[in-house]
Image (spheres, rainbow, N blue to C red):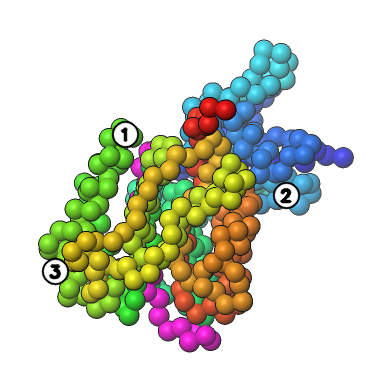
Amino acid sequence: MLRKRAGVILIENNQIALIERKRNGKVYYVIPGGGIETNETPEQAARREAVEELGVEVQLSELYCTLQDREDYYYKASIIQGGFGSGTGDEFTTGAHHRGTYKAVWVSLDKLKTLNVYPEELVQSLEINKGETEQLEKNRREGNHLRWVGSEKAYLDEPSCSQVGCVHVGRFGGSSSAGQTKNEDGCLVWSGGDWELAMVLDAHKTASSAVLILDEFERNRSIISSIIGKETREAMSELQPAVLALFQDEDFKQKCREVEGETACLLVVRKGKYLWWFSVGDCLLFLMHADLVGLGEAVQNHRSFYEWVGEVNTFDTIVPCFSTGTKELRKGINRIFLTTDGLLECPESNFHQPVEVTDRLKSDLIKEDIHRLLQEIKKKNVRDSTTILAWDVTIVEDGLMPSD
């Protein structure tokens, strides 16, 4: 019986990561991967093989395919950290030289047809889906950036899952059968080398207030990005004053007075091993990690009602009301999850209880979890729109622990 295998499909700059094999005078290439060990899931095996064969830690985005004639699992992936070509698996040790040589290489997708690459079925599939690969490359060139508001595309009755860099985006405009006619949510995603900025907005009356905030952040993108790009301590100390200055700017407040409606706003920045958030209103931030789950901690901010930005504007009062916080990420995989309140107020569900959300986000594949979650609220005929941003961050350093 053939051993089950798992592998990763890494594509960057129109190139795919392969293992170059030289054995008995022949040269051929294989998709990085290997056998699944006892008590190991295919996802765990794929990540382990990436470390051993390529020297990199990866984020799996989705199951690309399984080969029909045997139980092989291949996952789309992106590099989180590590030095490509620094693999230290058994095949790279001196004792393995009788099996030929192994080398991690990048190969142009245009050259795949001219090389002996295995498994052949997978290579054929990659060529068929080259258009999707080119779109991923276009996204990379555009800087892993997304700006969206529901008035542009509402996603009514249409759950949608996509990805921007490492951030997964889930959108559902609500059910028209429940009376929904528009989507007033919005979101923003930027990412840099060791950071991500994510924002969800839930507007009231019209989407105009969400558009106003998105426009303001886009205009100040270079300033905010340069702050986040600084050394971690400096970036985290400068971020909050910069964001407050944006919201309290007199020109911005005048624009708020002229807009129709108001919005809740949740802004989250991950920099290195730290998470910072700034919250006005009732959107929620979850942080999921094994250490925190054991202590019943998931939600980092709280739903605060009667706080808005826009026509009704907390920053136009004597004392603006908002909440903010900073969290050290734990060693291992940390799952960051932002959502607007459509999810939390879904009928015939208990998503207002954090455990009901975290229980549905336990698999290794975020995209599939989000898809199932959106399908569930669609089935339950939720009216209000739901926007979700979620991604995993792997931390290699130990977190702060008590002295005892």
Residue farthest right in this picture: 1
Q: Label 3: which residue? A: 254
Element carrying mark 2: strand
Which residue is at a point 32% across and 80% down the rendered structure image? 205
Which residue is at a point 40% across and 76% down the rendered structure image? 183
Stretch of the chain drawn in magenta: 176-194
Do we see residue 260 in this rendering? yes
**Residue 101 placement, left or right of 274:** right
Q: Residue 163, position in %: x, y?
A: 47, 55
Asked if residue 180 is among those painted magenta in the image, a careful observer would answer yes
Which residue is at a point 54% across and 74% down the rendered structure image? 346
Q: CA distance from mark 1 to mark 2?
A: 47 Å
Element carrying mark 3: helix
Q: Amino acid at mark 1?
A: Arg
Contact, mark 1 vs mark 2 (Cβ under 8 Å): no
Q: Residue 67, position in %: x, y?
A: 72, 49
Q: Amino acid at mark 2?
A: Leu
Residue farthest front in this picture: 404
**Residue 306 placement, left or right of 352:** left
Q: Nearer the viewer, residue 133 or 4?
A: 4
The answer to whether 329 is drawn above or below residue 101 in the figure is: below
Q: Label 1: which residue? A: 233
Going from N to C along the chain, the mark reached first, 3 or 1, is 1
How many C-alpha atoms fall within 10 Å of the one at disc 1: few (<14), some, or many (≥20)? few
Q: CA distance from mark 3 to mark 1?
A: 33 Å
Q: Label 2: which residue? A: 67
Q: Residue 31, position in %: x, y?
A: 63, 37
**Residue 304 placement, left or right of 3:** left
The answer to whether 206 is drawn above or below residue 241 in the figure is: below
